[in-house]
Amino acid sequence: MTMYVEREFKGPKIADGKTVISYYIYEAPLRLWHWLNALFIVVLGVTGYLIANPMPSVPGEASDSFWMGYIRFAHFAAAYCFAIALLGRVYWAFVGNQYSKQLFLFPFWDLQWWKEVMFELRWYLFLEPDPKKYLGHNPMAQFSMFFAFTLGAPYMIITGFALYSEGAGVGSWQDKLFGWVIPLLGGSQNLHTWHHIGLWAFVIFVILHIYAAVREDIMSRQTLISTIISGYRMFKD
Ligand code: HEM
Ligand code: HEM
């Protein structure tokens, strides 16, 4: 039978003969942003898909239903929230702790960091027996978050507001700020396609991201999912 003895001990916590050390990594605004951002992206993805692939006509009197209107409204409302939340997240990178900056900056010139990206890739491919442990994001996570999210989110915002400017009209702020994107990407139809491709890039990122988070949580003997909920990372062994 395992015995658990609660002791007043300020250092690492000892439970069942194993050491569990916890560090505070992700501060509350970052965690709140993560989950709100995930919600906005799910709404944007589902409504965006429906904008591109509208439902067949619904039965009943046409003037009683406003489905496409609601779907587009949800897309635009989530889009504004997504863009404003990203500005808030950029602000937090300036005032938050060192881990809050990892999403935007990575040590591009550090060869050791790139070697660790490759190590993580091998670990994810089951080619390394033991995981490395990191306080913030592991290098592979940081690399994929930077290329998929940090570059991908502004891309969706720029192409999205350029599309929006077509409805808002010439002279609107959307047109003044983002209207130039339409000719640059080859006109309205191509802009729709470029924005649409972004959906599938995000879908791929989210699938890999959730898979990696669950896999790491189980296999790497350090907490992941509870860390992005509570802020604390715990290390076993
Ligand atoms: C649309 C869905 C999601 C998106 C776009 C997304 C995006 C992100 C981003 C950008 C970060 C970096 C946070 C930062 O440094 O500010 C992050 C971290 C994280 N996310 Fe998500 N996320 C999504 C859903 C989820 C879900 C459903 C889970 C849980 C299964 C999850 C688990 C995590 C974990 C564990 C981290 C921290 C990883 C680490 O400590 O290295 N995410 N996510
Ligand atoms: C992760 C973020 C986003 C995803 C996944 C997404 C997805 C999509 C998709 C798949 C479409 C249909 C494109 C087509 O095939 O014609 C669409 C349309 C559109 N999106 Fe987004 N979008 C995102 C962010 C944004 C943002 C930030 C805005 C800014 C306002 C925006 C504004 C629009 C507009 C105006 C349309 C065209 C609506 C229409 O033609 O009725 N989107 N979006």
Image (tube, rainbow, N blue to C red):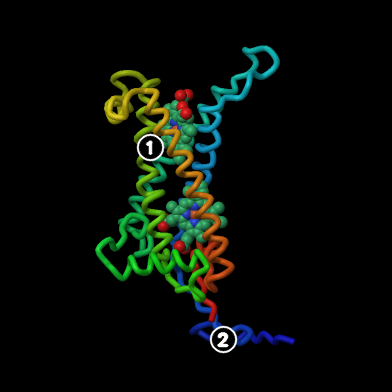
Which amino acid type is marked by label 1?
A: Ile
To which residue does mark 1 refer? Answer: 157
Side of 136 relative to 215 (left or right): left
Residue drawn at 50 percent across, 64 percent down: 125
Q: Amino acid at mark 2?
A: Glu
For disc 1, the neighbor class at 10 Å (few under 14, some 14 to 19, many from 20) is some
Helix, strand or loop at mark 2: loop
Place of residue 118 in the rendered image (x, y in percent of width and height, measured from the top left): 39, 66
Pick out the residue farthest to the right: 1
- For disc 1, does the CB lie below 8 Å from ligand 2? yes
Figure quadrant of residue 156: top left
4 and 148: which one is in front? 148
Q: Which residue is mark 2?
A: 8
Q: Position of residue 72 (x, y in %)?
A: 51, 27
User: Where is 105 relative to 2, above or below?
Assistant: above
Pick the quarter of the image with the N terminus.
Answer: bottom right
Q: Answer few, some or many: residues within 10 Å of disc 2's Cα (few below 14, many 20 plus, some between 14 and 19).
A: few
- Tag 2 and tag 1, C-beta contact below 8 Å: no
Q: Say which mark, if any, is on residue 28.
A: none
Q: Return the x and y of residue 198 as percentages of the image width and height.
A: 43, 39
